[in-house]
Image: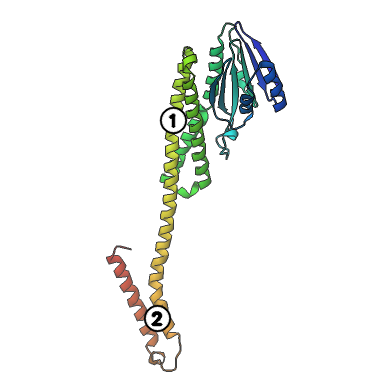
Amino acid sequence: MIIKEKAFESFTWIDIENANKNELEVIAKKHNLNYFLIKDALDIGHLPKYEQLHKHDFFIFRAYTSNINLNIDEIGEMSNKIAFFIFDDKLITIHRASFSFLNIHEEKHIKISELFLRIVGFMIDTFKKPIIEISNKISDIEKTIFLKDYRIVLIEELYYIKTQSRILKKIISITEATILKSQDKYKVSYIYQDIQDNLLNLLTINEESVENSTHLMNTYLSLSDQKNNEVVRLLTIFSVFFLPLNFIAGIYGMNFSFMPELSWKLGYAFALCIMAIVVIVIYLWFRRKKIL
């Protein structure tokens, strides 16, 4: 466990990193923190939330800490959270992962609400890069499917793109709702509106990515079905041509004693002519029905 304390004019910031359950229970008793909120802080996949208690406010926000090229489909794998306990005279942050943006060098006179919102703003900024990367990735795959060969694209890749964009949308949407719940207390800060604008921008881009990834998946499956149908159609056409020929060959391959064509000098040529006529008739019929 790593504990860092930084004193400002009106409050103290206590940052706790990678603490286990027992250590957090000790910290909870020391700072009079709610036990159930500590449990939420330990939950790896907990979504953003806001609770207003008698003596302090409690928040959970998530920051993106993964790589968009990895095959991951869980919230806990894509992002890590920070739990905030905001008192009148102290800010306590609890997290497992190490975040570089927490090395903040602020003026001593900064308010506790401004420091809190600044950290939240940094956390939200971590989603900007993966959301843009997913959007660009979808555009590249779309070009490959429509302008090149769709078989180059793997269905597994489409699945992870769709899942990751959906998870990102979920996190950003709940983060926005959490921010809105606390606007009565924190809207006065000049940073609040920047966060709102940033969230709206990210949500707009990501919603488009979710929609495009769904359409892309459906298009890919439709093209696969179309290709399979073309193969079945081709095999059907071949079978239509060869089935009557096999029937004719089967009749003359029975070798009964009383089959006049077997002893006929032109029997072989006669059978070939019948086969040719059958093929021509079938071909003309296909042409007339615009099948070929």
How many neighbours does mark 1 have within 10 angstroms: few (below 14), some (14-19), or many (20 or more)?
Answer: some
Amino acid carrying label 2: it is: Ile
Task: Give residue 228's position: percent from left, percent from top.
Answer: 44, 57
Question: Which label belongs to residue 248?
Answer: 2
Q: Is residue 227 left or right of residue 43?
A: left
Question: Which label belongs to residue 10?
Answer: none
Foreground mark, 2 or 1? 1
**Residue 143 in view (yes/no):** no
Q: Is residue 226 left or right of residue 76?
A: left
| Structure colour scheme | rainbow
Amino acid carrying label 1: it is: Ile
Question: Which label belongs to residue 205?
Answer: 1
Point out the residue furthest to the front here: 54
* Position above or below: 149 against 52: below
Q: Is residue 5 left or right of residue 214?
A: right
Q: Which image quadrant: the N terminus?
A: top right
Give how far apart the Cα atoms at labels 2 and 1 are. Answer: 65 Å
In this view, the residue in front, 53 or 134, is 53
Residue at 69% across, 16% down: 30
How many neighbours does mark 2 have within 10 angstroms: few (below 14), some (14-19), or many (20 or more)?
Answer: some
Task: Give residue 69's position: percent from left, percent from top.
Answer: 56, 37
Q: Which image quadrant: the C terminus?
A: bottom left
* Position above or below: 180 against 251: above
Q: Earlier in the sequence, mark 2 or mark 1?
A: 1
Residue at 40% across, 59% down: 230
In this view, the residue in front, 98 or 148, is 98
Task: Give residue 127's position: percent from left, percent from top.
Answer: 52, 28
